[in-house]
Image (tube, coloured by chain):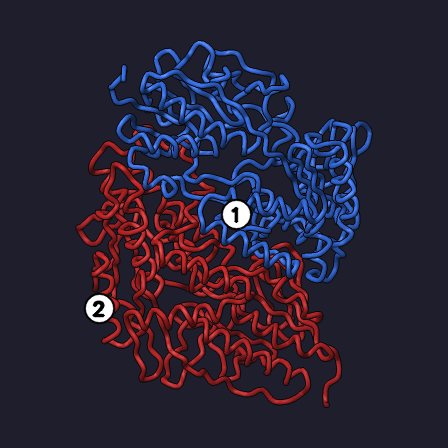
Chain colours: A blue, B red
Amino acid sequence: MPVSKRQHVVIVGGGFGGLYAARRLAREDGLLDVTLVDKQNYHLFQPLLYQVATAGLSAGSIASPIRGVLSEARNVTVRLGEATAVDLNAKRVQLLDGTALAYDQVVLTTGVRHSYFGHPEWEVHAPGLKSVDDALEVRRRVLMAFEKAEVEADERERQALLTFVVVGAGPTGVELAGALAELSRFTFARDFRVIDTKKARIVLIEAGPRVVSAFSERLSAKALASLQRLGVEVRLATRVTNVDGAGVRIGDELLASRTVLWAAGVEASPVAKSLGVPLDRLGRVIVNQDLTIPGHPDAFCIGDLASFQGPDGQPLPGLAPVAIQQGKHVGDNVAAAAEGWPKRPFEYFDKGTMATIGRAAGIAQTGKLELSGFLGWVAWLFIHIIFLIGFRNRALVLMEWSWAYLTYQRGARLIIGGEAPKQLPAGQ
Amino acid sequence: MPVSKRQHVVIVGGGFGGLYAARRLAREDGLLDVTLVDKQNYHLFQPLLYQVATAGLSAGSIASPIRGVLSEARNVTVRLGEATAVDLNAKRVQLLDGTALAYDQVVLTTGVRHSYFGHPEWEVHAPGLKSVDDALEVRRRVLMAFEKAEVEADERERQALLTFVVVGAGPTGVELAGALAELSRFTFARDFRVIDTKKARIVLIEAGPRVVSAFSERLSAKALASLQRLGVEVRLATRVTNVDGAGVRIGDELLASRTVLWAAGVEASPVAKSLGVPLDRLGRVIVNQDLTIPGHPDAFCIGDLASFQGPDGQPLPGLAPVAIQQGKHVGDNVAAAAEGWPKRPFEYFDKGTMATIGRAAGIAQTGKLELSGFLGWVAWLFIHIIFLIGFRNRALVLMEWSWAYLTYQRGARLIIGGEAPKQLPAGQ
């Protein structure tokens, strides 16, 4: 046992990576103390956020209070706060409230945020989907668009209100477009008296040649077919040139729309820039095979924030399983380092990827096995419930889904916050 | 059948009264058309709103989309909008968006809002609890107070952060204070590392001589004992003289507190004033025994907005059962009037009142029967679940409660919206 001093480990970020690292290090009660910092008080199950945005789930069902999850980890302190910079040489994490946390080892896992390809002014017209607040804002916009359309006298404006554009056909974009189609085709079918919600136009725009390009060509084609069956208009190899109050512009064409949702691009959270180390094209921290930051053996970076070169030479994708496995592994390495043992390289065990397209259709790919249709959807359902943290949430989500599946209803149809109906100008 | 013209009935307000009236009138598909106007898109089960405010339930679990509830009522149109005035002579409801709805008969049931006894400037420091937005704001303040206290270095400021003052000891105030005590004594007990949440001070201030004065003296004393057992400091016959950023002032005494919640008084929604008819002390519309507004046989007013003289000469209390029974009855009377039959007087069947104080203690009173303690709590639970509209919500609430009861945990501990942690000044 070469080292005996009790160490202080700071984990920045309470997503999958941070939470699994903290859980692993809770076993080292005699060896080290951990402080987990997050700007939210809850851990969020991001893969289901699109369900909150489309009124299928309550926000509380996919979020767990970080303090509650870690309450039995007596050597772990949870702190609400936003890290603005990390000084890797002075070994300090700077928080926005002015305090600084000194560390012996640090784990950075603050994830990514939306990127508008150099057009930050598009954000106000096309919100993305990263936090609960984002999801509630999207839900408000979507539900309000139907409410406004119901009382709109002008035919062109009504059309624009009933046109929903999703930019980006990765898993989130595909799932959003599918859920919007379900909402308008089934859930709302008998709820409005003036508009025919089935005629709502849902357009999914993708710059690349196919949807969910992380999947095989076969599954990608299946996903496309499922979307088209739901009536989603998919525009491939199409680049957005402008987004404003009028809608989305594609070259000379204007898609008049009052509800544009952004699922196109991400960039690393800004804390990465403060490190003064090499970043990749998306601003992510390029890490060593043992998950440390080059030149800083006591600083680790994992999850979406890290650019980790996989066996095929490509960076690992920004998926929950990657973050979970890295979180557990970084916990091992931090504990090993505290005891003076060598760190071990991380190896990703690819269990596959999956996505769902509306009701009872999904795609899943794991190694050579590919599932689609109902089987793909069941696999998706099963895996997502397994990964939800906390028994309570699992049971709630299962119940909300069973209910939605049996009745086509969606329970979380609340318009809250933001623009109140009273602020609508006359005629809207 | 003296009258045959198809009538248009406008219902203003989607609370219990409006919803039950609309359901009753849905049976008159051949006789009349109904438009239900509400400024929210959801019906809210207000008696459980304090549970959302104290992180026990998700907002979606106690709210149902009005369109969904009435989707099978084919002669009922739901419209999102805020009524600003009603012209009882011209028979038109004026909406904030500029449109006006002409009616043959109208049912007004827009309820009440908080009243600060002539001190509207207190509201920003002491939010009340009427809408989902209110409840989420209260939840945010309560959860943030604990988070701030955990990192606060100044002892006096930490004490103020851990002092929660509830003004008004009616059912809502008592339930809020009980839930806050539970939150700090049990739920949070092991979640914080610096502060001892069990030492949080919860003060309940009441101007009258006893808590829940609508109940018998015996039950009122039981409720007081339950509150004190939970560690709530109850101050009776105490009048608040000021509320500001420093806390609550009672005469010369300042209760330093960062979280003040208002459950003290209500006044009628402003639409009442536009009618030009006699109002009572709280601004409520004084109605005839058949629920019509005096001098306007085609205009009805029910629920909290109405002042209906009960058999004891007092106005009926603002309770869900009153609104439900009046909603059904007003539906009968509207249908009768449309057919040319006489309207019948309303009679309230008092099924009793109830309240809950923290975990597994409640009081219930129905006629001569009085329940308290665990039995009172079970009665409360049972009745509230029965009245929740929609099977899905009932099942969700039952599950969230069973979980909370078994584990002392609360699932909906999300800080969303409003002030982000990044806006905290240094040291808070």
Which quarter shows the N terminus of chain A? top left
Which of B398/A398 is in front?
A: A398
Label 2 environment density (alpha carbons within 10 Å; few <14, some 14–19, many ≥20): few
Residue A424 vs B35, above or below: the answer is above
**The quadrant where residue B267 appears:** bottom left
User: In this view, which residue lies farthest toward the left?
Assistant: B252
Under mark 1, the amino acid is Gly
Which of the two discs, 1 and 2, sits closer to the camera?
Answer: 1
Q: In the visual, does B222 lie left or right of B69?
A: left
Work out whether B351 lies above or below B199: below
Residue A427 visible in the snapshot = no
Between the residue at mark 1 and the residue at mark 2, the CA separation in whole angstroms equals 38 Å
Where residue B361 appears, as percent x and y from the top left, is 30, 66
Task: Name the residue rendered at 49%, 73% in the picture.
Answer: B323
| Residue under the point 56% across and 59% down | B42
Q: Amino acid at mark 2?
A: Pro
The label number, if any, that marks residue A169 in the structure image: none
Residue B130, x across and y down, in percent? 44, 58
Same-chain status of marks 1 and 2: no
Q: Secondary structure at mark 2?
A: loop
Q: Is residue B272 left or right of residue B4?
A: left
Report which residue position mark 1 lands on: A417
> Which residue bears the numbered disc 2?
B209
In depth, the one of B118 and A327 nearer the eye is A327
